[in-house]
């Protein structure tokens, strides 16, 4: 057979074997059925607004940008994503021929018998070679490894996006908690001012014998209760400020403020969308599926390891015992080799390794389903929380208005001698508690919208 015929046969063999890719085609897991959201209409959410479009508080927007730019955990995740990207490129390079070089200079002394068995060199030795190595991807092992590495990168990117969603939501949640504590401190300080004035009035009346000492002691207790609440709220405020600054990559210190919670403008009319849209958009679900897809490719890699590996090696260069004759026709070297290597008998080890990869894939499949179910539950819980907290917030406002008027009437009744000071104390306590509960409920209502947007996977683009 002539040289052209040999090359043609080689090409045909390569094409034949490269069509023998092992492993099955990946199919996306089925969407869980029977998922409904009773608290909202299913509207299109394929392009939710970003966080900066739903929050109109400039201070909060600044804190979110600082967190995205400087949070150390997020920067670590971004670095990990870049690592996965570089690794995917390195794995993909295995698909192509590798060209290397080799140069040797030296010499030695060997007897004739040693030379006969290639155990030494008698004289000088100089060579310069270019070496070409190429593993033919006959069974698709290298392609599957490359696909697995790409899926690992995409999973890493989705994990980074999921972390950003959680980070932004945590900044917003802590910010609304901080403004709630600011409001509670203000409520406590205003209450303390009123109770101090009341204590002074009752003290004057006691000095003139108009009221008993019991009334004075009760007034002083109420004043102390209001005063004692302020340090507790301030302590929580400092802890929350430091938590926010930690999220934004800063050390301890104060945090900028914007609108108070009562003036926040967040639209509750966020469309929920279909379950299939949630699967496409929520980063933790996307990351879970890419991890599953990457592991699925490893099954094919394990299957391919049960078959022979075919490699081609080419050597081109010069060799000579003397430098003066190295780069001459007599020193020219051109060699080509093909190799076939594969397992013959290893007690079923490779077969068991295929089974290992299948079981790992099965585990990730169940994890993907659990992640999806958790996401659907998060959405439903957030919808229910907002609906109920909105109703509670309306009731709290009515409670505060009624408690305010009740205290005013009770104080008038006491001043005119129609009731005891105990009734005033009860009304004071009711108003103080009602104002604090209203502040808490407003904060929780705002954070329920944060939770809903986080559950929908929105705002991270």
Image (cartoon, rainbow, N blue to C red):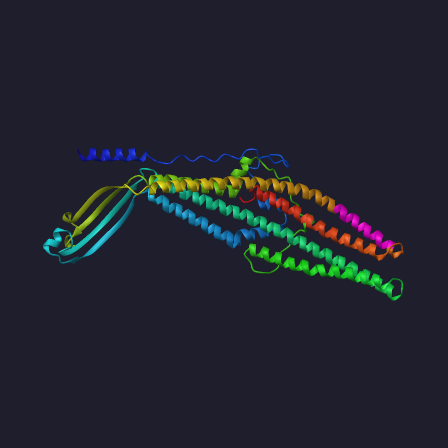
Q: Residue at x 53, y 41 (%)?
A: 282
Residue ranking furthest to the left: 112
Q: What residue range appears in magenta?
A: 397-413
Total marks in image: 0
316 relative to 42 in the view: left or right: left
Between 451 and 209, which is closer to the camera in this rendering?
Answer: 209
Q: Say if residue 390 shows up in the picture.
A: yes
Q: Residue at x 84, y 53 (%)?
A: 410
- Extreme-bottom residue of the structure: 207
Left or right of residue 207: residue 153: left
Main structural element of the magenta stretch: helix, strand or loop? helix
**Residue 425 rendering spot, x and y as whole percentages:** 80, 56
Residue 280, given in percent of the width and then of the height, sits at 51, 38
Q: What x and y, as percent, mark residue 320?
A: 16, 52
Foreground of the two, 120 or 157: 120
Q: Quadrant of residue 188?
A: bottom right
Residue 294 visible within the image: no
* Residue 365 appears left or right of 90: right
Write down the quadrant of residue 136 in the picture. Answer: top left
Q: Is residue 371 left or right of residue 352?
A: right
Residue 130, position in %: x, y?
24, 48
Nearest the viewer among 334 and 305 is: 305
* Picture quarter with the N terminus: top left
125 w.r.t. 213: above or below: above
Taking the view exactly as shown, the residue that stands out farthest to the front is: 347
| Residue at x-position 38% and y-position 42% | 146
């Amino acid at each position: 057979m002539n040289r052209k015929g040999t090359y043609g046969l080689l090409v045909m063999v390569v094409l034949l074997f490269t069509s023998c890719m092992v492993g099955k085609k990946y199919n996306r897991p089925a969407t869980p059925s029977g998922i409904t959201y009773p608290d909202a209409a299913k509207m299109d959410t394929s392009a939710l607004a970003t966080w900066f479009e739903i929050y109109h508080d400039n201070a909060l927007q600044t804190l979110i940008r600082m967190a995205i730019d400087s949070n150390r955990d997020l920067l670590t995740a971004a670095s990990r994503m870049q690592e996965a990207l570089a690794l995917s490129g390195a794995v993909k390079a295995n698909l192509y021929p590798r060209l290397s070089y080799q140069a040797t200079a030296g010499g030695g002394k060997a007897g004739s018998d040693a030379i006969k068995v290639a155990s030494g060199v008698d004289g000088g030795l100089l060579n310069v070679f270019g070496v070409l190595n190429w593993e033919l991807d006959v069974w698709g092992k290298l392609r599957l490894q490359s696909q697995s590495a790409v899926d690992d990168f995409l999973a890493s990117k989705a994990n980074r996006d999921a972390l950003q969603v959680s980070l932004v939501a945590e900044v917003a949640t802590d910010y609304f908690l901080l403004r709630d504590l600011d409001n509670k401190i203000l409520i406590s300080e205003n209450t303390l001012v009123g109770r101090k004035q009341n204590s002074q009035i009752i003290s004057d009346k006691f000095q003139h014998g108009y009221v008993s000492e019991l009334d004075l002691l009760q007034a002083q207790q109420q004043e102390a209760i209001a005063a004692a609440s302020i340090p507790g709220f301030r302590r929580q405020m400092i802890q929350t400020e430091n938590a926010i600054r930690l999220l934004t990559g800063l050390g301890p210190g104060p945090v900028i403020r914007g609108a108070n919670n009562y003036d926040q403008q967040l639209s509750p009319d966020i469309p929920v969308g279909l379950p299939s849209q949630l699967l496409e958009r929520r980063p933790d679900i996307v990351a879970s599926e890419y991890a599953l897809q990457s592991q699925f490719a490893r099954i094919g890699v394990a299957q391919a390891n049960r078959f022979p590996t075919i490699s081609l090696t080419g050597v081109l260069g010069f060799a000579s015992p003397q430098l003066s004759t190295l780069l001459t026709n007599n020193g020219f070297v051109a060699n080509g080799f093909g190799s076939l290597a594969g397992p013959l008998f290893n007690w079923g080890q490779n077969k068991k390794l295929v089974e290992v990869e299948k079981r790992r894939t099965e585990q990730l499949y169940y994890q993907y389903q659990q992640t999806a179910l958790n996401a659907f539950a998060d959405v439903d819980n957030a919808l229910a929380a907002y609906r109920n907290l909105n109703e509670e917030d309306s009731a709290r406002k009515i409670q505060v208005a009624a408690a305010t008027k009740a205290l005013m009437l009770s104080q008038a009744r006491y001043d005119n001698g129609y009731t005891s000071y105990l009734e005033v104390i009860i009304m004071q306590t009711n108003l103080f508690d009602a104002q604090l509960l209203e502040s808490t409920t407003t904060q929780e209502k705002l954070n329920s919208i944060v939770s809903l947007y986080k559950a929908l996977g929105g705002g991270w683009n």
